[in-house]
Image: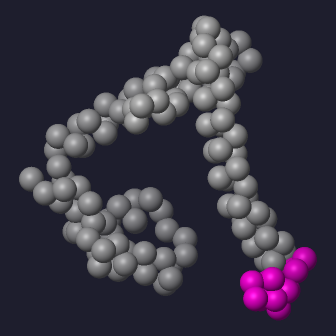
Amino acid sequence: MGKSVLTKRAREVIVEKFTDNPKMTKDELVDEIRPHYIPDLRKLQEQELGRIANRLAASVRDENGRREIFSIEENQKRKLIYVEKSQSLDDIKKVYNSLVKTKKGLNPSIKKVLHKGMELSGQISLDFRKKMNE
């Protein structure tokens, strides 16, 4: 069986579809990918088991609805930490740093979407956006 990845050209063709249609459903995107995709059944099974494990861990909540179990990287493997039950300060620090890193990673995307929303609502002009990128 082949690897379950797209060729560079297939990816380019599919991403180019967004130029013509900047809003599509996930099903439409899947339909674009399908002819280019060669599945690896063993890898697919492992990925599905991983998703089930992630969903199970993410579903464990405290009485206020906050997550209890978080994933960290340790020795190039993912480890799950049950924060409320953990007695390891090192693990708690790793969870904290992971959450902060995720938050920092989202900030540029949040700013981009906010900027586009302001642009579309007429609060800023396209000329201003161009000047900011120069």
Residue occupying the point 62% across, 28% down: 95
Span of residues in magenta: 122-134
Number of numbered discs visible in the structure rendering:
0
Residue occupying the point 42% across, 31% down: 75
Residue 126 in the magenta stretch? The answer is yes
- What main secondary structure does the magenta stretch of the protein show? helix
Q: For the view shown, which residue lies furthest in the bottom direction?
A: 127
Q: For the view shown, which residue lies furthest in the left direction?
A: 1
User: Quadrant location of the C terminus?
Assistant: bottom right
Q: Position of residue 64 (x, y in %)?
A: 74, 17
Say if 52 sits above or below 103 in the image. Answer: above
In this rendered view, identify the residue nearer to me: 89 or 45: 89
Residue occupying the point 50% across, 82% down: 19
Say if 31 sits above or below 119 in the image. Answer: above
Residue 77 in view in this figure? yes
Q: For the view shown, which residue lies furthest in the right direction?
A: 123
Residue 39 in the magenta stretch? The answer is no
Residue 127 occupies quadrant: bottom right
Say if 96 sits above or below 105 in the image. Answer: above
Q: Where is residue 14 in the image (x, y as percent from the top left)?
A: 37, 75
Residue 111 occupies quadrant: bottom right
Q: Position of residue 83 (x, y in %)?
A: 62, 17
Residue 61 in view in this figure? no
Residue 42 occupies quadrant: top left
Q: Where is residue 17 in the image (x, y as percent from the top left)?
A: 43, 79
Residue occupying the point 79% across, 70% down: 115
Q: Is residue 59 left or right of residue 114?
A: left
Q: In this view, does 23 lie to the left or right of 49?
A: right
